[in-house]
Image (tube, helix red, strand yellow):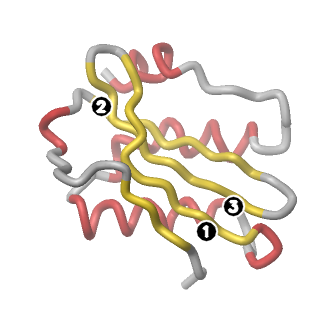
Amino acid sequence: MLDYRFEKFTDMFNKNNFSDFVLGVDLGGTSTNICIAGIRDSKPYILFIYYFETKRLDSLSSAINQVLSHAKEKFDLDESKFDYFKDIIIKQSINKNARLDFKHAAKKLK
């Protein structure tokens, strides 16, 4: 298990308040931040951020899998909602100019 710091951006989380969920990654030289946002009214709202020390990661996919497992265990978020994004994020993580369009991403989940 990888060490991380966790920050919750909402006190009262209810997964039913969101139509979909998005997983985003900021991969930096010092730290890697993995965010879960909920989509409501076609807008993303940051719910949780997991902070990892990049040099301690054995791979980006292991950090993403750990985040998804924690989200399932603690918040009952179904990992299958994130499969599309997980593949894209891992492929695009080497491209520093890659950005996920949240509106496009939300449509892909439906």
SS class, disc 3? helix
Image coords of residue 57 (percent x, y): 73, 73
Q: Quadrant of the C terminus?
A: top left
73 displayed left or right of 88: left
First-in-chain label (2 vs 3) = 2
Count residues near mark 2 (Cα–Cα under 10 Å), then give few for <14, some for 14-19, many for 20+: many
Q: Residue at x 23, y 60 (%)?
A: 75
Task: Name the residue beneath numbered marker 2.
Answer: 20
User: Disc 3 residue type?
Assistant: Leu
Q: Residue at x 55, y 59 (%)?
A: 64
User: Disc 2 residue type?
Assistant: Asp
Task: Name the residue beneath numbered marker 3.
Answer: 60
Give the CA separation, mark 2 to mark 3. 23 Å
First-in-chain label (1 vs 2) = 2
Task: Name the residue beneath numbered marker 1.
Answer: 62
Give the CA separation, mark 1 to mark 2. 23 Å
* Furthest residue toward bottom: 1
69 or 32, nearer to the observer: 32
Disc 3 to disc 1: CB gap under 8 Å: yes
Give the CA separation, mark 3 to mark 1. 5 Å
Residue 11, quarter of the rendered image: bottom left
SS class, disc 1? helix
Q: Residue at x 48, y 23 (%)?
A: 105
Image coords of residue 19 (percent x, y): 23, 27
70 or 80, nearer to the observer: 70
Image coords of residue 67 (percent x, y): 47, 63
